[in-house]
Amino acid sequence: MTKRKIPLRKCVGCNEQKSKKELIRIVKNKDGEMNVDFTGKAHGRGAYICPNEDCLKAAQKRKSLNRAFSQEIPDEIYEKLTEELKKNEG
């Protein structure tokens, strides 16, 4: 029996490699809308982040999402992502 390969992704906040299931995907679709994808299956360009606010704040400070999506990310998007992370924690 062969061992299944576990897909690893790097968090844009802390730069640690973790299994894909431990991270949350942030997606930018064709229309330029950004959403949190908890399923990991939404269409579009994705970046991964740990499910905590510290990593999101670090990504915002270092502009990691700007690099990942090759565009300037407005503060409203970070606020929306923070709210969605808080909702999903509970």
Image (cartoon, rainbow, N blue to C red):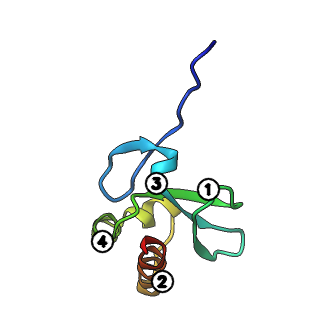
Question: Against 6, is 15 above or below?
Answer: below
Q: Residues within 10 Å of mark 2 (few under 14, many from 20)?
A: some
Residue 12 position within the rendered picture, expressed as x and y whole percent measured from the top left = 39, 56
Q: Secondary structure at mark 3?
A: loop
Residue at image location 72% in from the left, 69% down from the top? 30
**Disc 1 versus disc 2: distance between alpha carbons?**
18 Å
| Front-lying residue, 16 or 45 | 16
Q: How many marks?
A: 4
Amino acid tagged 1: Gly
Q: Which comes sooner in the sequence, label 2 or label 4?
A: 4
- Residues tagged 3 and 2 counted as in contact (Cβ below 8 A): no
Q: Quick check: 49 above or below 8?
A: below
Mark 1: few/some/many CA within 10 Å (<14, 14-19, 20+): some
| Residue designated by label 2 | 80
Residue bearing mark 4: 57
> Closer to the N terminus: mark 4 or mark 3?
3
Disc 4/disc 1 C-alpha distance (Å):
21 Å
What amino acid type is highlighted by mark number 3?
Leu
- Whether label 1 touches label 2, CB < 8 Å: no
| Image coordinates for residue 38, horizontal then vertical, percent | 57, 63
Label 3, on which residue? Answer: 23
SS for dot 2: helix
Task: Determine which of the numbered discs, if any, sits on residue 40 in the image.
Answer: 1
Q: Badge 4, how many Cα within 10 Å: few under 14, some, many 20+?
A: some
Q: Which image quarter is the C terminus in?
A: bottom left
How dense is the environment of label 3, judged by Cα within 10 Å: few (below 14), some, or many (20 and up)?
many
The Cα atoms of the two marked residues, 3 and 1, are separated by: 9 Å
Earlier-in-chain disc, 3 versus 1: 3
Between discs 4 and 1, the one toward the N terminus: 1
